[in-house]
Amino acid sequence: MSLPDTALEAAAEAIAGADALLVAAGAGMGVDSGLPDFRGPEGFWRAYPALGRAGIDFYSAASPATFRRDPAMAWGFYGHRLALYRATVPHAGFGLLGDWGRRMRAGWAVFTSNVDGHFQQSGAAPAALLECHGSIHHLQCLDDCHGAVWPADGFVPEVDAAQCRLLNAPPRCPHCGALARPNILMFGDGGWNAQREEAQAAQLQDWLAGLRRTRARLVVVEIGAGLAVPSVRHFVQGLQRTLGARLVRINPREAGVSGAHDVGLPAPALPALQAMAKRMPGPLR
Ligand SMILES: [Zn+2]
């Protein structure tokens, strides 16, 4: 992969000249750690061939209706992902972002649509972290009977990956005994418990308010956030509007930027971050 020197230097300069860093991550962030990309039915069915044979796409597998209709299959899918995300080591780009963030006068924060918990797992400790689609490492009642969200730590899924079915007992709601589900915003999901996400959002808004008060210069590094699921891009556009944030957009297919001071790097996450790191001025290297 070769990125133009001018773009890499502009990206490094944008980081070096900022007081605060916000990392905005989409599905592309996890690909370099070895996580599957669910873009398009081909990508999804390559990762879950049993679902391909049954003609079940991502939108249908990731739905509360599937937990009601076929819990062993729904938990076959999510249990496999839970085990995979637990076992996968986040790539070195997470560490680079943390290094840059810690050197910012006004600190750093993360907005991610990924449910893999990999920013936490990488040891990053940003001032705020918003998982806008929830976390696979947390559970809730399928009926959301008591409004509770609890860690999935005690649940170790045993999955027949070839059949995409859970072999052991699925987790249960401690209040009513109903099936528990991941605390993730699914498709067609009227029953998602958003309390954890809302608490994270409040913390992130406090951090952003602090930047506004102190007139801190914010740089946003947006990584692997496509146009198909626009949550991350919407959030970034809001920061550009309200805080005049400067944007570095890393995306192998959709790296276009419109602002005169924004930088697009058409590359996957890890090589782009490593190439930026090589251009950083001394204190940030
Ligand atoms: Zn319950």
Image (tube, rainbow, N blue to C red):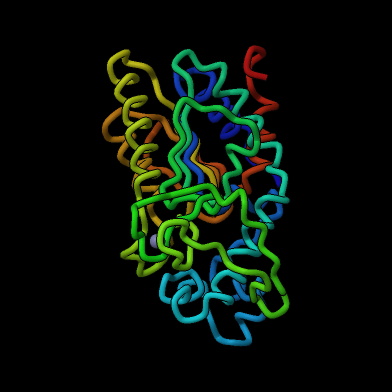
Q: Nearer the viewer, residue 139 or 9?
A: 139
Q: Nearer the viewer, residue 34 or 130?
A: 130
Quarter where residue 122 is shown: top right
Q: Nearer the viewer, residue 32 or 167?
A: 167
Residue 151 rendering spot, x and y as whole percentages = 53, 47
Say which residue appears at 43% left-offset and 52% top-offset. Answer: 133
Residue 240 rendering spot, x and y as whole percentages = 33, 35
Tell me the quadrant of ligand 1: bottom left
| Residue 21, placed above or below residue 201 | above
Say which residue appears at 26% left-offset and 31% top-offset. Answer: 242
Relative to 142, 15 lies left or right: right
Say which residue appears at 47% left-offset and 40% top-offset. Answer: 24
Q: Nearer the viewer, residue 281 or 83?
A: 83
| Residue 102, placed above or below residue 44 | above
Say which residue appears at 45% left-offset and 50% top-offset. Answer: 134
Relative to 53, 245 lies left or right: left
Q: How many marks?
A: 0
| Residue 42, placed above or below residue 1 | below
Residue 223 rendering spot, x and y as whole percentages = 53, 44
Residue 108 rendering spot, x and y as whole percentages = 48, 25
Quarter where residue 212 is shown: top left
Q: Is residue 269 visible?
A: yes
Q: Is residue 276 visible?
A: no
Split into 4 quadrants, where in the image is the C terminus? Answer: top right
